[in-house]
Image (cartoon, helix red, strand yellow):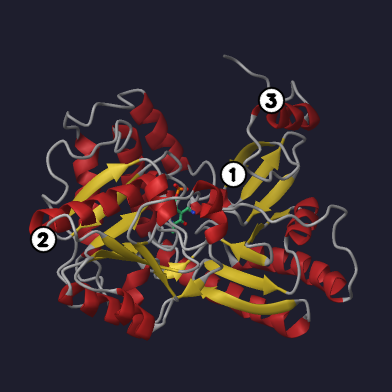
Amino acid sequence: MDFQPQDETADSIISRDNEYLLPVYSRYAVALERGEGVYLYDTDGRRYLDLMAGLGVNALGHAHPRMVAAFADQAARVVHLSPQYSSRFPGKLAEKLCSLTQGAAGAGSGLSGVFYSTGGSEAVEGALKLARSVAHKRFGAGKYGVVSLLGSYHGRTYGSLSVTGQAKYRDDFEPGLPGVQFIQRNNIAELRAAVNDSTCAILVEPILGEGGVYECTREFLAEARRLADAHNALLIFDEIQCGLGRTGRWFAYESYGIEPDVLILGKPLGGGVPLSAILVKKEFFHGLGLAKHGSTLGGSPLACRLGLEFLSVVEEENLLPQVRETGAYLRQQLLALTEAHSFVVEARGQGLLQALELRGPGRPLAEAALEQGVMLNCIQGNIIRFLPSFLLKREHVDTAIAVLDKLLREASAGLPVAPQAATTMASV
Ligand code: PMP
């Protein structure tokens, strides 16, 4: 099917979406056409600074020349194969991911096996199934408990939703998986009380992303590691949002020095093509078992080739130091906004995963910023989350901060910042 970029107005695109796409997302009133680097362009050619980055997927921005070339070359060879066949890239990417975990937590032995799927939720399912399967085989069917964190986000499928610590997402769909217990992040006493011999997994986001960008402490993660060992449970880190360079390290757990048994990755892994992975310690290599799990579309040659290209670009363009540097600058600027505006409660985060918590609804602010060419994301009703591409530089931060500064001044003065009423946006 051929298409002409200018053959339709934004209004007609938006109204067709409203007619045919289920109203599960609270969409912004913009129709996008293409992207380049940190910018997106709408159908009228208007440019936007993209700080949403496809919910953290577009870590290399848009249309990175190396990604485009790899995509085109691989598309002309083979896009998808049954996972029953071997091809060059899935194993190569798995080998590379495992090598990145060697020494990542200091003394830890690293992770040494990979299972691919498509999205984050699906990978969380795989990790839960692995934990249950390992526990069943070793200790019998009674060991199926999962300890997870209040405020966490692990996905929308039944298993991943059941372990997501936000009742508002689960409410309409109960009952979920049995045996799930939620505890307060960083509350060591609650953690100790929750974990016992019937626990098969402790599931943690080292930095809670969708929940509002809250960090776990090293002490809490160390205690989770100790308890998992003491009770033969798997320690699972969900780094779908905070991993793969987002904090300026390959993995968020590196800065804590605590190694998981299972690491879950997703979002940017396939360079924009659906790809997620669970990485497991050597002793759990056979944990799932032959024909006990699967994913038709998981780990395609195309996705894995793009995954390898993504990792190479991050390494060869030296993007991890850039994430740390731009992240530190963004943090400093957000702290300055916190000082300057009474509408801001707090700034927090690491690298290019940062948040600005507001005293009121953030959606009108995101809408107003969009009108001024800056794409922000509002989560949890009152938090602006920054999840930009790793290509972001200081000058881009300056542009965004200037827009935010103006809008926050208006908001602090009690002025309306956008015509539309605030809505709580279901965000991932
Ligand atoms: N875990 C975390 C930490 C996430 O941030 C997300 C998505 N935001 C998921 C799981 C679910 O991933 P997906 O939407 O790709 O299923």
427 over 24 or under it: above or below: below
Query: Residue flagged by tag 3: what amino acid is it?
Result: Pro
Q: Nearer the viewer, mark 2 or mark 3?
A: 2
Q: In this view, does 278 lie to the left or right of 267?
A: left
15 over 418 or under it: above or below: above
Tell me how far mark 1 sits from mark 2, CA to CA. 53 Å
Reading the chain from its start, which is encountered first: label 2 or label 3? Answer: 3
**Residue 93 x %, y %:** 25, 47
Reading the chain from its start, which is encountered first: label 1 or label 2? Answer: 1
Tell me how far mark 1 sits from mark 3, CA to CA. 16 Å
Disc 3 packing (10 Å; few <14; some 14–19; many ≥20): few
Disc 2, SS: helix
- Find disc 2 in the rendering and name its residue: 139
Query: Residue flagged by tag 2: what amino acid is it?
Result: Phe
The residue under the point 50% across, 59% down is 390
Q: Pick the residue in front: 338 or 49.
A: 338
Q: Is residue 10 left or right of residue 74?
A: right
Q: Which of marks 1 and 2 is in front?
A: 2
Q: In which quarter of the image is residue 307?
A: top left
Does the CB distance between marks 1 and 3 fall below 8 Å? no
Mark number for residue 36?
Answer: 1
Confirm if mark 3 falls within 8 A of ligand 1.
no
- Find disc 3 in the rendering and name its residue: 5
Q: Is residue 184 left or right of residue 10?
A: left
3 over 102 or under it: above or below: above
**Residue 308 x %, y %:** 31, 46
Q: Pick the residue in front: 64 or 365.
A: 365
The residue under the point 25% across, 60% down is 262
The answer, for residue 115, to whether it is visible in the render is yes
Q: Is residue 332 left or right of residue 403?
A: left
